[in-house]
Amino acid sequence: GSPPQRQTLIIDTGSRLMAFPCEPCRSCGSHVSKKYFNPLMSTTDNTPTCGSCMLEGISKCSEFSTVVGNGKGAKNKKCVISQKYTEGSSWTAYELEDMVWMGASDHQESIGMEYMKMAVPYVFGCQTSEKGLFRKQYADGILGLAIHESSLVQALYDARSINRLAFSLCLTKAGGSLSAGGIATEERHLEPIRFTPISRDHGWFALTVEQVLLGSVCLAGCKTKDESSSFTLDHEDTALRAFHGGKGTILDSGTTDTYLPQAIAEKFQKSWKSLTGGLQYSRRRYKYSYAEYEKLPSLTFKFENNVTLTVQPDSYMESVSASKILSRDPWEGTIELVNRIYIDEPTGAVLGANTMLGYDILFDIEGKQVGLAKADCDTEIYHGVVDTERR
């Protein structure tokens, strides 16, 4: 807005809309910014009305809500958006267009010219109601970055604020960074970045899984090499086909946990018990000694072009104590942990934010590919972008 009103958002590569509460939302929760966005304080806001709705196919004309306070008259009906999620959360909003840009962790730096020059007019959801987790969450709202013409990254690219239709995420348990237009710096990479194609055109970042390992045990894609050492999909491998079913295997930063297909459940549980010396796989809380924790296996995904993503126990296990962030440092006694890997997805897989920790991931929409590199995502970075050449 103008003047700026800061909002802290969840980065969600599995959805396509930006939305957060606006004044006077009486059915919204309390979030980190404390104050809701107030359209009346902005000199650059525009509220689309029926007949001029901008999110075609997403919003609909409301018979009841009206535009208030922006000089367009109370009889103009708003363009209303409603979103529901599988775990029961939902929100309702109306379309609002205003100047939007991505900022830094420091508020004053974010409103400096280096950032504000990237501002673009952008349509988002001005929330009038929140239910479920959206009402309780720390963040003010959500920033959807799935592949769609209505995404903020697309708007930045169309306005030439960034040179490539791409963005990158480098996540840690305490936060991380988002870079628009490419990777902020390769200096924090611990290995060369490698690229795998986006395998579907449905808007999600779906990747082709060739093999899945739990520790050293193969769960899927165990017969993936022919005589020429190239990948072939074994149609008798029901476990691997399950990763390719439905929407496929998608990278979804807006989902905290990871969901694997139920087709691998039996083998996953047996392998888990064998690798851990008798511990049962469970989603229940369990008090682990460090000796038990050390036996927990890594989870490895091998994608097309021999690109590998390995998830360590400190990423998929979570401390029950809100004040304790799990690390690889030894401890005395026991710590109560819960496993954040699910093995009950009907088909396909969702690789949530906990699989992305410790990787710099380039979502290269223009190149129709995703790049992955192990990285020190805690490292301070230059607040800018680098151009990403097609590879």
Image: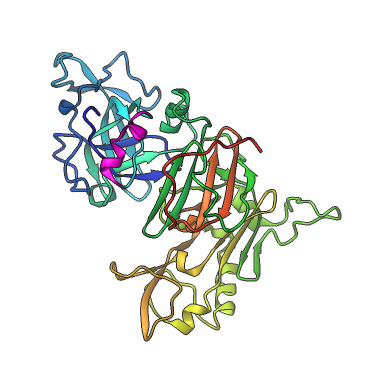
Q: Where in the figure is residue 324, as x and y percent of width and height?
A: 32, 70
- Is residue 105 shown in magenta? no
Percent across and percent down for residue 6 are 25, 39
Is residue 90 or residue 287 the one in the foreground? 287
Give the main secondary structure, helix, strand or loop, of the magenta stretch. Answer: helix
Answer with left or right where residue 367 lies relative to residue 378. Answer: right
Q: Please say whether residue 342 is visible from this viewpoint.
A: yes
Q: Residue at x 59, y 73 (%)?
A: 271
Give the number of callouts: 0
Relative to 337, say whether 74 is above or below.
above
Residue 158 percent across, percent down from the top left: 47, 23
Is 170 situated left or right of 24 in this image? Answer: right
Residue under the point 47% across and 51% down: 170
Magenta stretch holds residue 109: yes
Relative vertical location of residue 181 with respect to residue 85 in this rendering, above or below? above
- Is residue 345 visible in the rendered image? The answer is no
Rendered position, 295 above or below 153? below
Which image quadrant is residue 269 in? bottom right
Pick the front one: 301 or 373: 373
Q: Residue 175 in the image: x percent, y percent?
A: 37, 54
345 or 341, which lies in front?
Answer: 341
Q: Residue at x 30, y 71 (%)?
A: 321
In the rendered image, the quadrant that contains the C terminus is: top right
Colour mapping used in the image:
rainbow
Q: Residue furthest bottom?
A: 333
> From the viewer's perspective, is 269 left or right of 74?
right
What is the span of residues highlighted in magenta in the rendered image? 106-117
Q: Relative to the observer, which residue lies in front, 380 or 253? A: 380
Q: Residue at x 59, y 79 (%)?
A: 274
Tell me if 261 is positioned left or right of 13 in this view. right
Quarter of the image with the N terminus is: top left
